Amino acid sequence: MARARHRGSRLGSVLSASAWLAAVAAATATDQARPNPRGTALDGWFGVKRRHIWDDDLLGTALIFTLMAFFLSITALATQSGVDRHRGGARANLPLIVLASISALALAVLGSVLS
Protein backbone atom coordinates (compact mmCIF):
# COMPACT_ATOMS: atom_id res chain seq x y z
CA MET A 1 0.00 0.00 0.00
CA ALA A 2 2.84 2.39 0.81
CA ARG A 3 4.43 1.61 -2.52
CA ALA A 4 1.22 2.60 -4.36
CA ARG A 5 1.13 5.91 -2.49
CA HIS A 6 4.77 6.53 -3.38
CA ARG A 7 3.96 5.88 -7.07
CA GLY A 8 1.04 8.29 -6.83
CA SER A 9 3.26 10.95 -5.32
CA ARG A 10 5.88 10.41 -8.02
CA LEU A 11 3.19 10.55 -10.72
CA GLY A 12 1.92 13.83 -9.27
CA SER A 13 5.43 15.28 -9.38
CA VAL A 14 5.95 14.19 -12.99
CA LEU A 15 2.57 15.63 -14.01
CA SER A 16 3.36 18.88 -12.20
CA ALA A 17 6.72 19.26 -13.95
CA SER A 18 5.10 18.42 -17.29
CA ALA A 19 2.43 21.06 -16.70
CA TRP A 20 5.05 23.72 -16.03
CA LEU A 21 7.02 22.71 -19.13
CA ALA A 22 3.85 22.98 -21.22
CA ALA A 23 3.21 26.43 -19.74
CA VAL A 24 6.74 27.57 -20.65
CA ALA A 25 6.26 26.21 -24.18
CA ALA A 26 2.95 28.11 -24.45
CA ALA A 27 4.59 31.35 -23.31
CA THR A 28 7.43 30.84 -25.80
CA ALA A 29 5.02 30.16 -28.68
CA THR A 30 2.99 33.26 -27.77
CA ASP A 31 6.14 35.36 -27.69
CA GLN A 32 7.20 34.09 -31.11
CA ALA A 33 3.71 34.77 -32.53
CA ARG A 34 3.69 38.50 -31.78
CA PRO A 35 4.54 40.95 -34.52
CA ASN A 36 8.04 42.41 -34.74
CA PRO A 37 7.86 45.43 -37.04
CA ARG A 38 11.25 46.83 -35.97
CA GLY A 39 13.35 43.69 -36.31
CA THR A 40 17.11 43.77 -35.81
CA ALA A 41 20.00 45.33 -37.66
CA LEU A 42 20.88 42.03 -39.32
CA ASP A 43 17.38 41.48 -40.76
CA GLY A 44 18.05 43.78 -43.70
CA TRP A 45 21.32 42.09 -44.58
CA PHE A 46 19.87 38.58 -44.58
CA GLY A 47 16.50 39.46 -46.10
CA VAL A 48 14.43 38.38 -43.09
CA LYS A 49 10.72 39.13 -43.55
CA ARG A 50 9.19 41.11 -40.71
CA ARG A 51 5.66 40.40 -39.53
CA HIS A 52 3.28 43.23 -38.78
CA ILE A 53 0.45 40.97 -37.58
CA TRP A 54 0.13 38.12 -35.10
CA ASP A 55 0.91 34.63 -36.44
CA ASP A 56 -2.29 32.58 -36.07
CA ASP A 57 -0.49 29.25 -36.51
CA LEU A 58 1.82 29.94 -33.57
CA LEU A 59 -1.13 31.18 -31.50
CA GLY A 60 -2.85 27.87 -32.24
CA THR A 61 0.24 26.06 -31.01
CA ALA A 62 0.21 28.22 -27.88
CA LEU A 63 -3.46 27.31 -27.37
CA ILE A 64 -2.62 23.60 -27.54
CA PHE A 65 0.26 23.96 -25.05
CA THR A 66 -1.97 26.02 -22.73
CA LEU A 67 -4.65 23.34 -22.90
CA MET A 68 -2.03 20.72 -22.07
CA ALA A 69 -0.78 22.80 -19.12
CA PHE A 70 -4.34 23.20 -17.82
CA PHE A 71 -5.24 19.52 -17.99
CA LEU A 72 -1.87 18.37 -16.64
CA SER A 73 -2.11 20.77 -13.68
CA ILE A 74 -5.68 19.67 -12.87
CA THR A 75 -4.63 15.99 -13.12
CA ALA A 76 -1.56 16.62 -10.94
CA LEU A 77 -3.71 18.39 -8.35
CA ALA A 78 -6.16 15.49 -8.29
CA THR A 79 -3.36 12.92 -8.04
CA GLN A 80 -1.51 14.75 -5.29
CA SER A 81 -4.64 15.47 -3.28
CA GLY A 82 -5.61 11.79 -3.47
CA VAL A 83 -2.19 10.76 -2.20
CA ASP A 84 -2.23 13.39 0.55
CA ARG A 85 -5.72 12.34 1.64
CA HIS A 86 -4.42 8.80 2.25
CA ARG A 87 -1.54 10.18 4.30
CA GLY A 88 -3.94 11.80 6.71
CA GLY A 89 -3.95 15.41 5.59
CA ALA A 90 -4.62 17.22 2.36
CA ARG A 91 -2.33 20.15 1.66
CA ALA A 92 -2.94 22.61 -1.13
CA ASN A 93 -0.30 22.85 -3.84
CA LEU A 94 -0.43 26.61 -4.43
CA PRO A 95 1.87 26.72 -7.51
CA LEU A 96 -0.33 24.20 -9.32
CA ILE A 97 -3.48 26.08 -8.36
CA VAL A 98 -1.93 29.28 -9.72
CA LEU A 99 -0.87 27.49 -12.92
CA ALA A 100 -4.37 26.07 -13.43
CA SER A 101 -5.88 29.53 -12.91
CA ILE A 102 -3.46 31.23 -15.30
CA SER A 103 -3.99 28.49 -17.87
CA ALA A 104 -7.78 28.86 -17.65
CA LEU A 105 -7.48 32.62 -18.13
CA ALA A 106 -5.06 32.16 -21.06
CA LEU A 107 -7.43 29.63 -22.65
CA ALA A 108 -10.23 32.18 -22.49
CA VAL A 109 -8.07 34.90 -24.03
CA LEU A 110 -6.56 32.71 -26.75
CA GLY A 111 -9.96 31.20 -27.53
CA SER A 112 -11.50 34.63 -28.03
CA VAL A 113 -8.55 35.84 -30.14
CA LEU A 114 -8.56 32.81 -32.42
CA SER A 115 -12.34 32.61 -32.91
Image (cartoon, helix red, strand yellow):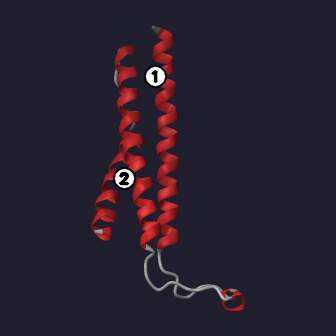
| Quadrant location of the N terminus in the rendered image | top left
Q: How many marks?
A: 2
Q: Residue at x 67, y 89 (%)?
A: 47
Query: Looking at the picture, how far across and down is residue 24, in whole percent?
Result: 51, 54
Query: Looking at the picture, how far across and down is residue 29, in whole percent?
Result: 50, 64
Mark sitting on residue 8: 1
> Can residue 62 be seen in this snapshot?
yes
Disc 2 packing (10 Å; few <14; some 14–19; many ≥20)? many
| Residue 80 left/right relative to 10 | left
Query: Looking at the picture, how far across and down is residue 109, in whole percent?
Result: 31, 64
Query: Which of the 4 image quarters holds residue 86?
Result: top left
Tell me which amino acid carries mark 1. Gly
Q: Residue at x 35, y 39 (%)?
A: 74
Q: CA distance from mark 1 to mark 2?
A: 24 Å
- Which residue lies most toward the top here? 1
Image height of 41 relative to 92, above or below? below
Q: Residue at x 47, y 14 (%)?
A: 4
Tell me which amino acid carries mark 2. Ser
- Which residue lies most toward the bottom here? 44
Q: Residue at x 48, y 80 (%)?
A: 35
Image height of 42 relative to 9, above or below? below
Mark sitting on residue 103: 2
Query: Looking at the picture, how far across and down is residue 52, in whole percent?
Result: 47, 86
Among the two numbered marks 1 and 2 on one chain, the one whose residue lies closer to the N terminus: 1
Query: Which of the 4 image quarters holds residue 39?
Result: bottom right
Image height of 37 relative to 70, above or below? below
Image height of 83 relative to 50, above or below? above
Secondary structure at badge 2 equals helix
| Residue 112 left/right relative to 3 | left
| Residue 40 left/right relative to 71 | right
